[in-house]
Image (cartoon, rainbow, N blue to C red):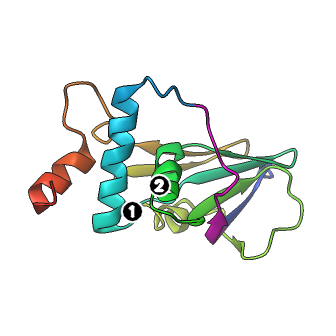
Amino acid sequence: MKREFRYKLYFCPEFPIDDLHWRRDERDKALLEFIDTITAHIREFGLENPPTVYRRKGRFDVRPGKCRVTAYQRLGHTTIPAVIADFDTGPPLAGWEPLPYDRDAVQALYSGDCVVELDHRFFNVKKNVDVVNRPGVENKFAKELREHGAI
């Protein structure tokens, strides 16, 4: 028996990010340094993985991808390519392109650093553990920038 999905999937090449903000503690130096590194990486190489945006009860929530959205905002962009999991299942907004419920088709939007999970209840993108920032460990973005000679 095939279960119905509780959400619709879309890709939006220009999702507006002007109103997307998330609380972060300005005292969190490690997080701000990580965002600086992602900003430099995006400036040098472009965006590798679109953030995931959830629409529930008319509200938009970014997860994962808050650091990428902040980096894009720092670079002066007002839009970002995004995958949208629409739990409101209302009509799509302008510019939203429907995605099939096919893991391989959705995975094609992401690099090898991420794994897409489709379930009838949720949509999830898991990061490779080497991408996650850990204190005292050079993250993937800083390593690529160093190897490229950008830092």
Q: Tell me what residue is drawn at x 22 percent, y 47 percent.
A: 142
Left or right of 52? Residue 151 is: left
Which sits in the foreground, 65 or 75?
75
Mark 2 highlights which residue?
A: 74
**Mark 1 surroundings: few (<14), some (14-19) or many (≥20) residues within 10 A:** some
Check if residue 21 falls in the magenta segment: yes
Horizontal and vertical percent for residue 107? 48, 61
The residue under label 2 is which amino acid type?
A: Arg
**Mark 2 surroundings: few (<14), some (14-19) or many (≥20) residues within 10 A:** few
Left or right of 80? Residue 7 is: right
Label ID, residue 14? none
Q: Quadrant of residue 135?
A: top left
Which sits in the foreground, 148 or 102?
148
Label ID, residue 48? 1
Residue 107 makes an appearance in the image:
yes
Q: Which residues are magenta?
A: 11-23
Q: Counting residues from the N terminus, which is met first, the one under dot 1 or under dot 2?
A: 1
**Mark pair 1, 2: CA separation:** 17 Å
Left or right of 47? Residue 150 is: left
Which sits in the foreground, 122 or 39?
39
Q: Tell me what residue is drawn at x 53 percent, y 65 percent.
A: 77
Instruction: Decide: is 46 above or below 122.
Output: below
Residue 112 makes an appearance in the image:
no
Judged from the image, the secondary structure of the residue bearing numbered disc 2 is: helix
Left or right of 89? Residue 110 is: left
The residue under label 1 is which amino acid type?
A: Glu
Horizontal and vertical percent for residue 112? 34, 57
Judged from the image, the secondary structure of the residue bearing numbered disc 1 is: loop
Q: Tell me what residue is drawn at x 60 percent, y 65 percent.
A: 78
Instruction: Decide: is 80 above or below 54.
Output: below
Tag 1 and tag 2, C-beta contact below 8 Å: no
